[in-house]
Image (spheres, rainbow, N blue to C red):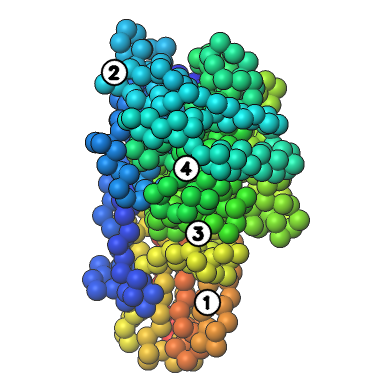
């Protein structure tokens, strides 16, 4: 994704900061407090929740320094470090790398120390203590060199045992072999030998627990304007002792994640954060299916917050890591038509490839183009696919291969009484931004007999905003029927469904804003650093009980 000139942007997004809808109320269709429309409402939202936006060079430096400031006396060594709370060092170093040319004097020296490889002597007093504490040895094979020390230092124990080194080399080789076999590019060779390391991918082992990190990657040479690919080096923990999962599992998923960042450098090192981190987290699950460590990111995903845009970036990074679930949904659908998951992901990155002469799509363009290229797997294109993803998240056990272990997305319940005639959504519920959704769940009142039907009137934005709607009926006999709603050009539709308590347990309507339209390069942290064209749009739902 090519970087354009950037200016600040006020996007005015309306997204949920967190979801606190009571599960019992949502699933029962009853709310403890409902407004005049009759629906539970999502948590209060902020009209200025647009993410951190473009950083200045000084801000990028401050963020990287904050990440690489060791905890007092290595205090983190006393407790497990969950990956979901680890800072996003790779993206922080990417931003610093991009802004390095705007710094001078002491600031420039501090930036260089942060971006440089962790080799002996790389110590700037009071700034960064990431020197590997001991003499460096290397083991190199088939496109990768692992650098480590077997000596024990006085400040931090960077020592890697022969078993640690062998396990790291074997894991990197395994990941590399599988991705190359699937057609992915190898990480770019480090052509600037004067920067240290080798022409192969250099992986350094050192104690990262004092930073709360599992691993990270960074470019090996200064940024050159107009060049959007990058060779990288990577760093992973030396032994993964004291982390929130077993050392072997932590090593495997960390190497898969970080190696894929190095692969991304061969395609487009400036791609949008949600695709970079989401696909790296996706690769963990694809290559090491039995570990499932990336499930912890689902708490920041649309499984938990369907009202928060898929591409939204917050400073914790939880949302962009959690976007792996959308890519999982797409790759599993593609697999049902014979497209291997790794092949699907490779084709997305080939569309994003910013190498000379390549397509250079930005993230949503690349994903949408790949969806459109597979009509058998994704009938109806992106709008329908995104809506069905949102609806699938209400029944993860039915729509994902490992979905029984995933959280179920929340729904907003409507309260029906014996005398209910009509209910409708209110603006706080149905004002949707791009790539967001809501699900309304309706349970028939106990008095509703066999002739009662529910009239569902949808008044959504026009076709340009990629609206979508799915109606799902949960029958008392256990059967579940799902129907995609065909909207007219104005985004309207009317459907009538049975609503008798004897046969119908509940009806759910999932409504979505699947817009992928942006005015790019306006300085945001969203897709293509742009401003969404179809945000804060009314997606109205009106329900009428017919007797």
Discs 2, 4 touching: Cβ within 8 Å: no
Q: Mark 1–mark 4 contact, CB under 8 Å? A: no
- Residue 241 visible? The answer is yes
Distance between mark 4 and mark 3 Cα atoms: 39 Å
- Residue that label 3 marks: 390
Figure quadrant of residue 420:
bottom left
Mark 2, residues whose alpha carbon is within 10 Å: few (<14), some, or many (≥20)? few
Q: What is the x, y in percent for residue 86? A: 38, 43
Reading the chain from its start, which is encountered first: label 1 or label 4? 4
Q: How much space separates mark 1 and mark 2, taking CA atoms?
A: 64 Å
Q: Helix, strand, or loop for circle 1?
A: strand
Dot 2 or dot 3, earlier in sequence: 2
Q: Tell me whether the residue at label 2 lies in contact with that at label 3, contact meaning CB atoms closer than 8 angstroms.
A: no
Q: Nearer the viewer, mark 2 or mark 4?
A: 4
Disc number placed over residue 454 in the picture, else none: none
Q: Which of the two discs, 4 and 3, labels the residue nearer the N terminus?
A: 4
Dot 3: element: helix
Q: Kindly identify which residue carries mark 4.
A: 239
Which residue is found at the position 60% from the left and 64% from the top? Answer: 401
Q: Identify the residue shown where x is 23% and y is 71%.
A: 33
Residue identified by numbered label 1? 473
Q: CA distance from mark 1 to mark 3?
A: 16 Å
Q: Which quadrant would the N terminus be assigned to in this image?
A: top right
Q: Quadrant of the C terminus?
A: bottom left
Give the mark nearer the N terminus: 1 vs 2. 2
Q: CA distance from mark 2 to mark 3?
A: 50 Å
Q: Which residue is mark 2?
A: 125
């Amino acid at each position: 994704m090519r970087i354009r000139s950037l200016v600040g942007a006020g996007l005015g997004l309306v997204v949920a900061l967190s979801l606190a809808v009571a599960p019992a109320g949502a699933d029962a269709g009853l709310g403890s407090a409902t407004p005049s429309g009759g629906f539970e409402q999502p948590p209060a939202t902020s009209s200025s929740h647009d993410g951190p936006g473009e950083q200045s060079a000084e801000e990028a430096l401050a963020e990287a320094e904050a990440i690489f400031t060791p905890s007092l006396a290595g205090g983190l060594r006393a407790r497990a470090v969950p990956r979901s709370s680890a800072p996003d060092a790779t993206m922080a170093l990417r931003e610093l790398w991009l802004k390095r040319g705007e710094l001078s004097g002491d600031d420039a020296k501090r930036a260089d120390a942060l971006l440089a490889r962790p080799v002996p002597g790389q110590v700037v007093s009071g700034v960064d203590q990431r020197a590997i504490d001991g003499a460096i040895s290397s083991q190199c094979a088939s496109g990768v060199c692992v650098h480590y020390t077997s000596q024990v230092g006085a400040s931090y124990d960077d020592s890697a045992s022969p078993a640690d080194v062998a396990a790291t080399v074997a894991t990197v080789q395994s990941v590399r072999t599988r991705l190359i076999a699937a057609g992915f590019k190898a990480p770019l060779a480090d052509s600037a030998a004067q920067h240290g390391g080798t022409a192969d991918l250099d992986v350094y082992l050192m104690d990262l627990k004092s930073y709360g990190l599992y691993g990270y990657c960074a470019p090996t040479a200064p940024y050159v304007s107009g060049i959007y690919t990058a060779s990288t080096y990577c760093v992973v923990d030396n032994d993964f002792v004291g982390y929130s999962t077993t050392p072997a599992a932590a090593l495997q998923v960390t190497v898969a994640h970080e190696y894929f960042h190095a692969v991304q450098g061969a395609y487009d090192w400036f791609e949008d954060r949600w695709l970079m981190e989401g696909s790296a987290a996706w690769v963990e699950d694809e290559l090491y299916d039995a570990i499932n460590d990336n499930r912890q990111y689902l708490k920041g995903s649309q499984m938990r917050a369907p009202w928060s845009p898929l591409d939204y970036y917050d400073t914790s990074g939880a949302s962009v890591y959690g976007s792996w679930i959308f890519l999982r949904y797409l790759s599993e659908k593609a697999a049902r038509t014979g497209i291997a998951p790794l092949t699907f992901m490779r084709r997305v990155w080939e569309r994003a490839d910013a190498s000379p002469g390549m397509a250079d799509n930005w993230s949503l363009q690349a994903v949408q183009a790949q969806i459109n290229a597979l009509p058998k797997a994704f009938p109806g294109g992106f709008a329908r696919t995104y809506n069905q993803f949102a609806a699938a998240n209400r029944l993860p056990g039915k729509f994902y291969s490992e979905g029984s272990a995933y959280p179920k997305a929340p729904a907003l319940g409507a309260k029906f009484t014996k005398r209910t005639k009509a209910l409708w959504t209110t603006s706080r519920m149905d004002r949707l931004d791009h790539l967001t959704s809501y699900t309304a769940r309706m349970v028939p009142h106990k008095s509703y007999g066999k002739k009662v039907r529910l009239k569902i009137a949808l008044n959504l934005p026009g076709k340009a905003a990629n609206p979508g709607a799915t109606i799902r009926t949960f029958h008392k006999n256990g059967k579940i029927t799902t129907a995609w709603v065909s909207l007219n050009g104005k985004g309207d539709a009317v459907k009538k469904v049975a609503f008798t308590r004897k046969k119908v347990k509940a009806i759910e309507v999932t409504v979505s804003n699947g817009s992928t339209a942006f005015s790019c390069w306006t300085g945001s942290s969203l897709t293509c650093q742009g401003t969404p064209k179809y945000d804060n749009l009314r997606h109205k739902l009106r329900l009428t009980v017919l007797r």
